Image: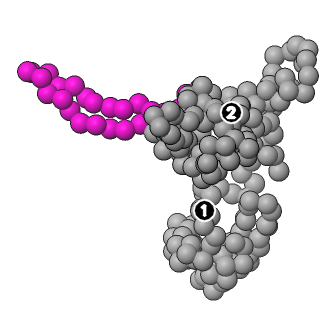
């Protein structure tokens, strides 16, 4: 990813320096412009180049610009602690770290981003919560299923659907299908296929649990 982006950005007007950092799942390209360059014009030029290079990137790659900020813009760091208490085992410790990261990403971060002059809030550490479906290969063979069948079933059964308006006399009722997954049991009860009127659920071919993303 890094090389096509660098190649496309080469020759941008008023460019003085370009450097990059490539890691697993991350390509960070830094463009330095002459001080006389207007920041909004610079962003526009870079964005135009990124749109042109997008088709050359691997599927699923989404290039983006970070918000306007200075190189020394990090002004505050804080640490989130769990309530004091004994940790029974490693699994319990992981659950605490998952809960702390979830609170940071979904409660504290949105509140801080609403503060005037705060451009962004970066989260580090902890474990990012995931609902994991651990498929058993033997069960897939038993029910004549593929991994793609399970993936498609879970993806297509996790969405809300807008209906229309049902009119009755002087009243209108909004029709809506609520299908967002909320619990582990919701995932387990998703139907993957049916054979002779008997449904095969996700729970029949996989173990569903709360885990965490791999931390790099």
Q: Nearer the viewer, residue 105 or 110?
A: 105
Dot 1, how many residues are within 10 Å of its Cα: few (below 14), some (14-19), or many (20+)? few
**Disc 2: which residue:** 208
Residue at the location (56% across, 36% down)?
200
Q: Which of the 4 image quarters holds residue 62? A: bottom right
x and y percentages locating residue 97 in the rendered image: 80, 30
Residue at the location (59% across, 83% down)?
13
Residue numbers of the magenta segment: 160-183
x and y percentages locating residue 125 in the rendered image: 81, 40
Q: Is residue 36 visible?
A: no
In the figure, is residue 45 to the left or right of 211? left
Residue at the extreme top of the image, as rendered: 85
Colour approach in the figure: one colour
Residue at the extreme left of the image, as rendered: 169
**Disc 1: which residue:** 60
| Relative height, residue 202 to residue 39 (above, below) | above
Residue at the location (60% across, 67% down)?
59
x and y percentages locating residue 215 in the rendered image: 81, 46
Secondary structure of residue under mark 2: strand
Q: For residue 123: magenta? A: no
| The N terminus: image quadrant | bottom right
Q: Which of the 4 image quarters holds residue 109? A: top right
Q: Is residue 195 visible?
A: yes
């Amino acid at each position: 990813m890094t090389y096509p982006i660098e190649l496309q950005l080469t020759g941008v007007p008023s460019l003085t320096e370009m450097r990059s950092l490539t890691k697993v799942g991350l390509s960070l390209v830094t463009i330095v412009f002459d001080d006389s360059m207007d920041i909004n014009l610079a962003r526009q030029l870079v964005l135009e180049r990124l749109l042109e290079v997008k088709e050359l990137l691997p599927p699923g790659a989404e290039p983006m610009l970070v918000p306007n900020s200075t190189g020394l813009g990090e002004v505050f760091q804080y640490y989130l602690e769990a309530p004091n208490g004994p940790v029974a085992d490693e699994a319990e410790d992981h659950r605490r770290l998952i809960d702390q990261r979830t609170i940071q990403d979904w409660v504290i971060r949105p509140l801080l981003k609403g503060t005037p002059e705060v451009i962004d809030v970066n989260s580090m550490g902890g474990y990012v919560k995931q609902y994991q479906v651990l498929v058993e290969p033997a069960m897939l063979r038993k029910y004549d299923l593929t991994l793609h069948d399970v993936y498609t079933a879970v993806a297509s059964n996790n969405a809300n659907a807008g209906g229309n308006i049902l009119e009755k006399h002087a009243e209108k009722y909004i029709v809506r299908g609520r299908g967002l997954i909320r619990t582990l049991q919701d995932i387990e009860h998703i139907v993957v296929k049916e054979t002779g009127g008997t449904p095969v659920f996700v729970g029949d071919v996989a173990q569903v649990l709360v885990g965490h993303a791999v931390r790099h």
